[in-house]
Image (cartoon, grey):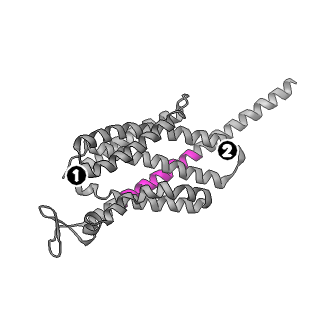
Amino acid sequence: MAEFDTIRTQGAAIGRAEIDQGLRAHMNKVYGTMSLGMLITAAAAWAISVLAVTSDPTGATVALREGQYLTGLGEVLYTTPLRWVVMFAPLAFILFGWGTLMRRGSAAAVSLGFFVFAAVMGVSMSSIFLVFTSYSIVQTFLVTAIAFAGLSLYGYTTKRDLSGMGTFLMMGVIGLIVAMIINIFLQSPAMMFAISAIGILVFAGLTAFYTQAIKSEYVAHAAHGDQEWLEKAAIDGALGLYIAFLNMFQFLLMFMGQQE
């Protein structure tokens, strides 16, 4: 009997070790995919901002500031109705496209969908280079990265169950979206300040929540050994953390960003 208990204990220890090793690899894939998505977004945003602005007034129809003008591309992206498409396309994809892609698409298709989304998000965010100085953008990005790392580490290591926060935080996200749409028409600085402050708190909470959820989901499903599902789950987790990071960054930029 004692020998049987020893074998069972050793088997459980080996199982835990395999899960721990697999979890580390899974989380590395999540963070790696997220980081690559961030790189694509940054590259797309910077490239579009460079192509959208010129110092040559020849043929330019819109003056941005002294010595700088919008190119034809910039005029189309930032002054025509297309700007609304660019602004809301990422949100529309998350609400109406991502779930279907996760259910029906292969891991390769989900991965491609994420990276295309990251590129479109970069186009959508490109206007920040027209509004804020490069120094303040980099500074805010570094602050966001430090905060994100701490929050994600907390979500990964804490013994506290954060699942109860999910509904509350998602209600906060919906409220933020509605408030931002309303403020497009009101253009209220006070309202934008409040939205930014609440947004930082909401997406800080979501960073910890998503990290714990990714970890818990892996532990619950690792025994099934469905590699295709695990790959898709890693990309889905990367998307959640990517969105939390970018939103924290944008809301912090409202506070820390120095305008051109």
Q: Does 35 lie within the magenta span? A: yes
Q: Secondary structure at mark 2?
A: helix
User: The magenta stretch spans which residues?
Assistant: 26-44
Q: Amino acid at mark 2?
A: Ala
Q: Quadrant of residue 102?
A: bottom right
Q: Is residue 107 above or below residue 4?
A: below
Disc 1 crowd rating (10 Å Cα; few below 14, some 14-19, many 20+) is: some
Q: Is residue 123 left or right of residue 224?
A: left
Q: Is residue 26 above or below residue 118?
A: above
Q: Is residue 63 above or below residue 258?
A: below
Residue positioned most to the bottom: 59
Q: Secondary structure at mark 1?
A: loop
Q: Of the numbered discs in the image, which one, if any, rests on residue 222? A: 2
| For marks 2 and 1 on the same chain, the one whose residue lies earlier in the sequence | 1
Quadrant the N terminus occupies: top right
Query: Residue drawn at (63%, 50%), measured in percent from left and top?
Result: 230
Disc 2 crowd rating (10 Å Cα; few below 14, some 14-19, many 20+) is: some
Residue positioned most to the left: 66
Q: Is residue 60 left or right of residue 29?
A: left
Q: Main secondary structure of the magenta part?
A: helix
Where is residue 48 shown, x and y percent of the image? 31, 64
Residue positioned most to the top: 2
What distance separates the C-alpha of mark 2 from that of mark 1?
A: 45 Å
User: Which residue is disc 1 drawn over?
Assistant: 133
Query: Residue drawn at (69%, 51%), measured in percent from left and top?
Result: 226
Q: Amino acid at mark 1?
A: Thr
Query: Residue drawn at (25%, 72%), measured in percent from left and top?
Result: 72
Where is residue 26 shown, x and y percent of the image? 58, 47
- 134 and 183: which is toward the camera: 183
